[in-house]
Image (cartoon, grey):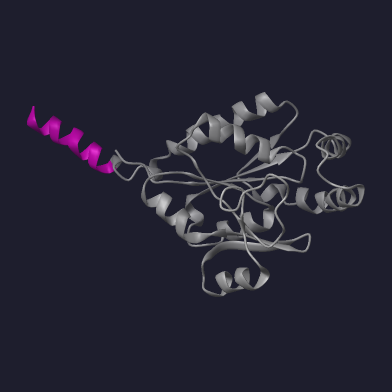
Amino acid sequence: MTRKGLLLILSSPSGAGKSTLAKKLMTWDPTLRFSVSATTRSPRPGETDGQDYFFRSRPEFEAMVAAGEMLEHAEVFGNFYGSPKGPVEAAMAEGRDTLFDIDWQGGQQIRNSALGRDVVSIFVLPPSIAELDRRLRTRGQDSDEVIAGRMAKSRDEISHWAEYDYVLVNTDLDQTFDELVTILRAERMRRDRQPGLAGFVRGLNGEFEAR
């Protein structure tokens, strides 16, 4: 029985843990395909083009959007981000799941797209705003000004929690990860994601008739 690939969307305000959870999930199941986003922002130290992001100029990115090559796209903190459509459709046809680490805007676009029926969306909340601020400062990637901008934006991001299929409060990373795995396992077993199931049942009925 073949299984149709699904689109697993993880969203959260910056610092709530979605990227860490996404990396743990990829380690747990190497068959998952991670959707590498295209972006117009400059690479950070240690980032590799085609592995962390597809780094594109603004004109190149806009040309991809105009050609219908993006499943979703949005402007965040002055830069464009988007998910190339072709690799996602190819993975679905192979029965492979695609994991998206994107914001609520991108998730909304994918849910409203032709692939929306195959989306499983999960929003990750921090246990408190104070903890969210602490995590942003602890990772040491951004200036105070950038952190202030991310904190200001987090209230709007959190307001979209009810648009998601599942909501997890990331108080303990290991527990939250276990809950994430439970969701994925259950969603993979949904009847409508197993196109070969009807044929299998017909075969069972044929065995009854042959007795």
Residue at figure coordinates x 67%, y 40% from the top left: 19
Q: Residue at x 72, y 51 (%)?
A: 160
Front residue of this view, candidates 135 and 183: 135
Give whichever of 191, 94 is nearer the camera: 94
Residue pictured at 56% horizontal, 70% vertical:
64
Q: x, y (%) of residue 30?
A: 48, 34
Q: Which residues are magenta?
A: 198-211
Q: Nearer the viewer, residue 60 or 90?
A: 60
State whether the magenta stretch is mostly helix, strand or loop.
Answer: helix
Q: Position of residue 96 (x, y in %)?
A: 42, 44
Residue 200 covered by magenta stretch: yes
82 vs 14: above or below: below
* Furthest residue toward left: 210
Number of labelled discs? 0
Q: Residue 159: where, in percent of width, then height? A: 77, 51
Name the image quarter holding the C terminus.
Answer: top left
On screen, residue 81 versus residue 6, left or right, reads: right
In the image, residue 139 lies at what x, y percent?
80, 37
Image quarter hosting the N terminus: top left
* Residue 97 drawn in magenta: no
Above or below for 209 versus 54: above
Q: Is residue 48 left or right of residue 142?
A: left
Left or right: 162 as drawn, with respect to 187: right
Residue at the spot 61% in from the left edge and 53% down from the top edge:
53
Determine the image quadrant of residue 63.
Answer: bottom right
